[in-house]
Image (tube, rainbow, N blue to C red):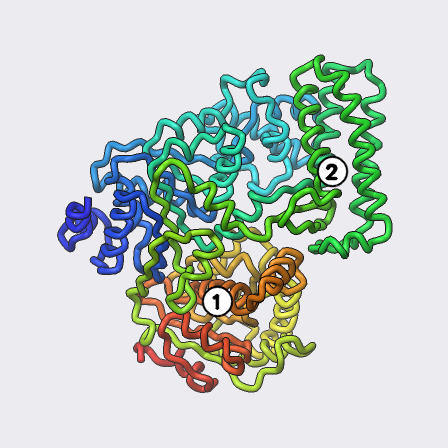
Amino acid sequence: MTASLADVFSATGPLATGVPGYRLRSQQVAMAERIAEAMTANRMLVAEAGTGTGKTYAYLVPAMLSGGKVIISTGTRNLQDQLYTRDIPTIRRILKSPIRVAVLKGRANYLCHYHLGRSLADGRFLSRDDAAYAQRIARFAKTTGTGDKAECTDVPENSTVWAMVTSTRDNCLGQDCPNHKECFVLAARRDALAADLVVVNHHLFFADVMLRDEGTAELLPACNAVIFDEAHQLPEVASLFFGESVSTAQLLDLTRDIQLEALAAARDCLDLPTHCERLEKASRELRLTLPLDPARHALRQLEARPGFASGLTAVIDAFAALTALLETQAQRSEGLENCWRRAGELQSRLQSWQSGAHADYVRWGESYSHSLQLNATPLAIAEIMQKQMSGHPRAWIFTSATLAVQEDFAHYCSEMGLLDACSIRWESPFDYARQALLYAPRSLPDPNSADYTAAVVAAALPVLVASGGRAFFLCTSLRAMRRTHELLAAELGRAQPDLPLLLQGERSKNELLERFRRLGNAILIGSQSFWEGVDVRGEALSLVVIDKLPFAPPDDPVLSARIERLRSEGRNAFIEYQLPRAVINVKQGAGRLIRDENDRGVLMICDPRLIDKAYGKRIWRSLPPMKRTRELAEAVAFFSSNVMA
């Protein structure tokens, strides 16, 4: 395979003749060769490839030439769709490859005939819009071949109606479903099982991995190689799936489903609605024991809230009574039997959370506007990952633009349990010394001071004016994001009223990005959503401002528990855990700036700790080799020069 790779990527090969604008990049060829070697030898490979390397083609070509079944897992559904609809068809056409390709998404992305029919018959929609959307979805159901809601373009993807016409793992009736034979989820899974190359996302991959312990995993047993793109996201996703959670929203969904099934099959059981109402009331009262604003809560904070402990007990007691009654009615219909099974599983999870049944897990809660989720998250995932990667020999490839800290992969490999992995990195082919400038302003106050955001906005304003907008203003918290928007709106109103301000949350992410590109002089103020996975090429984005170094808040329940564990082992939690994570996040944010060999721009990192603290050096040395300055005049002058200096 290695010999043919050189031909494929050569200056006169099929990629050069078949892909407009293709250029031979030595980093891309080297990466493809290392991936091919790992696939042939069934090894683990951790590969960091700087922006512009062309890592997508570097793993797709050897994957298609390998002759085995390959799973490619991406960080987002957008990247998943891009691979399936654009990149894979291009490479497949160029290589004249006969391989079968499939895309598989989570079940919430596929229309469910059963739940659509039930919702239409019930007619209890939350709004007129939802009722109208349901009719559009019903028409879509008659014409679609896949049931993928992304294809139903005249219903907004975030509409609440989708939850009523799709299934969850909890409420799927499985083989008992009257629409089992026409199920879109099962059809997508059949295609995936028959395909040579399957594109999934990280959440779906780990959902399948979790089924392995139950003996029902479908994807993993059959594959020869797994390739993770955007692999820096895996520790967070794996923690989520290897943990356990239960929410009041799940309980309310269950009571709604029970009442609908009871109307159809157990109308004479008058106690069922009463028990459902009791559980609904207890669930809502449990949520109200916490403040209304969404937040994360450590276990000790939850236990200190008046009424929380008794409220949780009331929910469990109401659940026990409902589950016992459901057992007497379960044989009357498939739907009621499924509800009984769901109730038993959710009740068990609640009781496990209350009793702290999981060793080496941290218990915590997250409150949303209308619900509360109780979580048990593993303090470490390395051993769990090692267990999942054992067994059948296969290649495991982990790739991203941001995995290393100063060329060191120790943090990532240790956290993921990749003790036997080979690791390698390639610098970006872009000429950062000519294309970009890193500006660290002087005289900013301590990042924890009350006037910090105002000082950041004041420091950034002349640079934003010099750049003519065309900027991402990346904040580390929603509060700072909103305050930045408020201050900039006032300042720009006086200094530069023609620079449009866009704010995360005002519209969907894709709509904001489209508007940003179209306007050509906008300033987009965002938080976590815009630090990664965003690609704006050309002059529309010429300045990235980062307000603070993105250290996770130390009062985060999971982070604080992991810090405490490391300290108890005599280790330095800041150097070993918090700093590497911050470095990877900074690299992601900085990576928004230069996306093409013709891009140029300024990266402004405002946090004085970048310069004042010893660890700051580790951060900026992990960034691409940009020219650096602390002088405002140099940053401003960068935008007035017409040639790259």
Horizontal side of residue 70 vs 277, given as left or right: left
Horizontal side of residue 638 vs 237, given as left or right: left
N-terminal label among 1 and 2: 2
Horizontal side of residue 260 vs 571, given as left or right: right
Quickly name the residue at label 2: 351
Give residue 362's position: percent from left, percent from top: 66, 51
Tell me the quadrant of the picture where the C terminus can be found: bottom left
The residue nearer to you, when weighing 176 against 470, is 176
Q: Tag 1's secondary structure?
A: helix
Q: Is residue 445 above or below residue 430?
A: below
Residue at the spot 38% in from the left edge and 53% down from the top edge: 399
Q: Is residue 53 above or below residue 97?
A: below
Q: Is residue 514 visible?
A: no
Give residue 430's position: percent from left, percent from top: 30, 67
The label number, if any, that marks residue 466 in the structure image: none
Residue at the spot 67% in from the left edge and 28% down from the top edge: 342
Going by the numbered disc 1, the residue's amino acid type is: Val
Quickly name the residue at label 1: 583
The residue at the far left in this view is 12
Give residue 9's position: percent from left, percent from top: 19, 51
Task: Calculate the distance from the C-alpha at mark 1 to the C-alpha at mark 2.
Answer: 39 Å
Q: Is residue 420 above or below residue 159?
A: below
